[in-house]
Image (cartoon, rainbow, N blue to C red):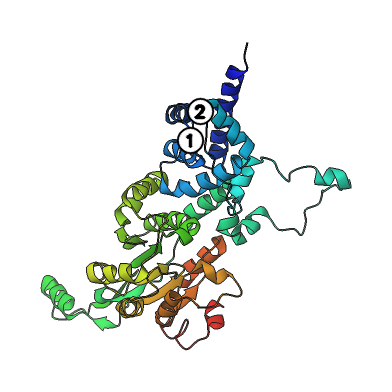
Amino acid sequence: MTDEPLEEGRFAQNIMHFGRVLRAAGLPIGPGKIIDATRAVEAAGITSRDDFYWTLHSVFVNRRDQREIFDQAFHVFWRNPQILERMMSLMLPTIQSDGQAEYDPPSRRLLDALFPGRGDSGDHEETGEIIGDAAGTYSQQEILQSMDFESMSADEIAQAKAAIARMRLPIMRVPTRRFAPDPRGARIDMRASLRSALRSGSDTIPLKRSARRHRHPPLVVLCDISGSMSRYSRMMLHFLHAVTNDRDRVFTFVFGTRLTNITRFLRNRDVDVALEKVSENVEDWSGGTRIGQCIKEFNTQWSRRVLGQGALVLLISDGLDRDSGEGLESEIERLHKSCRRLIWLNPLLRYEGFEPKSLGVRAILPHVDEFRTVHNLQSLQDVAQALAREMPRTAEGHMGHSLGERAA
């Protein structure tokens, strides 16, 4: 009796454990996919580490936003070369193995999936401390409000998404050019007054009054989905879905190397269905960024359609441009002149030492009315409060203000 069946069982067991790690990290992995992955590896063979990587990738990853978690999980779970060489020896007699590479630290979602329950016990038992009274400490909700999206675990991301779904965006109401009947209005509506007099047949003319109509201005969102913004853009799409289903006249565009209108997808009431449709129709996830070219496309094809009646524009981007800001300043200036207010949300502003050094940031900064950070739930609430009040274009975020004043 040989050990070969035992080794093959361990090989399948390792893939099963890897699938469980991915499922704990948030990927939709079931028993069927684990079986398919085992069969795929057996059919494709393992001639190198890259072949093994892409074989599992083809089975476990079906959306672009899952690539980063899979990549980190693969390089952490299979980082022991002896495990990989042992697996290779089960498949082929001679194998060419690649060298081990350096990788970024894994996210908290992945660490919680690989080491469940880490940090929950052990420390208090060694010191003998007993935690009883929690008075005066921060609640979990308060900690979640200030926690960076990038450092959240899978459970915290789920709680943040639930909090975002409950958010409401109280955009201020602005006067329009049309009038509506109002008994206390300051304007006399002569046409309505004469019609009333003709209907009653009286000798006197009852005066009818009217006042200007007030309504919410359109909200236009341009969201960067490049590789440097991937962790934040996913949370922002949940926020934009909640906003789109909360009020009318919300238009959402995403851009990386091209511009895509995703407004009709986000109008679906089910957030999972909406984001799945967005993922299927957007082809430049987690790639490069051509901000100037994409804003030019928006100005040319969409600005006249969606920027009417004093629209507010949210630009969500870190300002890192692959084209080194070529043509960006003129296009962002045109966008700024076409809207009521242009608000730039940049997650890099959360760093105290942030300075506008890149050419893209320097091109955008002089032409925005407000410059805000967007990296946690509290920052999203601050954005909602900023949109709820009317503010002159020169009162906050003026071009002459310093970066520190703008951030404050």
Q: Are marks 2 and 1 in contact (CB under 8 Å)?
A: yes
Q: Residue furthest bottom?
A: 400
Q: Secondary structure at mark 2?
A: loop
Residue topped by disc 1: 47
Find residue 211 and report its horizontal and vertical position in percent: 29, 77
Residue topped by disc 2: 92
> Residue 205: which quarter of the image?
bottom left
Amino acid at the residue labelled 1: Thr
Give me the C-alpha separation between circle 2 and circle 1: 8 Å
Camera-nearest residue between 356 and 92:
92
Q: Residue furthest right?
A: 128
- Judge from the rendering whether residue 96 lies leftward or rightward of residue 288; answer left or right: right
Find residue 345 and report its horizontal and vertical position in percent: 47, 69
Asked if 90 appears above or below 185 in the picture, the reply is above
Q: Quadrant of the N terminus?
A: top right
Local crowd at mark 2 within 10 Å, few (<14), some, or many (≥20)? few
Asked if 288 appears above or below 400 in the picture, the reply is above
